[in-house]
Amino acid sequence: MPNLQDVKAAIDEFLGMQRGLSELDVSGYYALFPSGARTDIPISGGWDSEPYPHQYKAGVYLIFSKDLELIYIGKTDSNFGSRLYNHFKGSGACKVVQPGWSKKPHYVVNIPVERSKSHAVSPVCLEDFLINRLQPCDNTRGIIKNSEDGQNGYEITSTIANDADWS
């Protein structure tokens, strides 16, 4: 399973293919369950005390298991706070509200993607690239697979298991 190092390598590859795109700011791990957070990694915030990193920006978010395995990549065109609220809610303790996770989400990492006149990269471009490159276990939409009929072609899946309303 991919981890944050794999994500950073894929982002470097993505940046190498883009003209005029500066380095992207990858946040640290945000602990959804701070009391059970690992002590061997730097934590950039936690559910019980701080808002999501880059809360009011658009971009790509990464969801990791307790073992720091990347399990899902998503995007928001508005802001991280409202989009991630669709996955996690609760006043006080965090509650995972989306069903169907292969492993329980424990950490979120955010990557803000700013649009500018010098480049036209949007969160969906980065999200699609990272999903195809890293193929997290809980993403099914956007992963290019060899066609099952043996033809020289690809098919793109179009749903995410157990949830028809994810974006």
Image (spheres, rainbow, N blue to C red):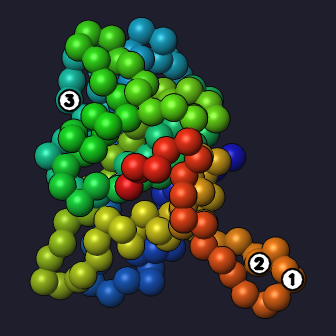
Give SS at disc 3.
Answer: loop
CB atoms of marks 2 and 3 within 8 Å:
no
Q: Residue furthest front?
A: 164
Identify the secondary structure beneath mark 1. loop
Tell me the distance, in whole angstroms, between the alpha carbons under discs 2 and 1: 6 Å
Tag 2: amino acid: Ser
Residue located beneath label 3 in the image: 51
- Quadrant containing the C terminus in the rendered view: bottom left
Residue 12 showing in the rendered view: no
Q: Quadrant of residue 120?
A: bottom left
* Most foreground residue, 107 or 138: 138
Q: Which residue is mark 2?
A: 147
The circle drawn on residue 150 is 1
Image vertical order of residue 122 relative to residue 19, above or below: above
Which mark, residue 92? none
Instruction: Estimate the x, y position of residue 78 in percent, counting from the top left.
Output: 18, 55
Residue 94, relative to residue 61: is it above or below? above
At 21% across and 39% down in the image, what residue appears?
81
Image coordinates for residue 51, horizontal then vertical, percent: 20, 29
Between the C-alphas of marks 3 and 1, the distance is: 48 Å
Q: Quadrant of residue 52?
A: top left
- In contact (CB < 8 Å): disc 2 and disc 1: yes
| Position of 79 relative to 158 (above/below) | above
**Number of residues whose C-alpha sits closer than 10 Å to that of mark 3, classed few (under 14), some (14–19) or many (20 or more):** some
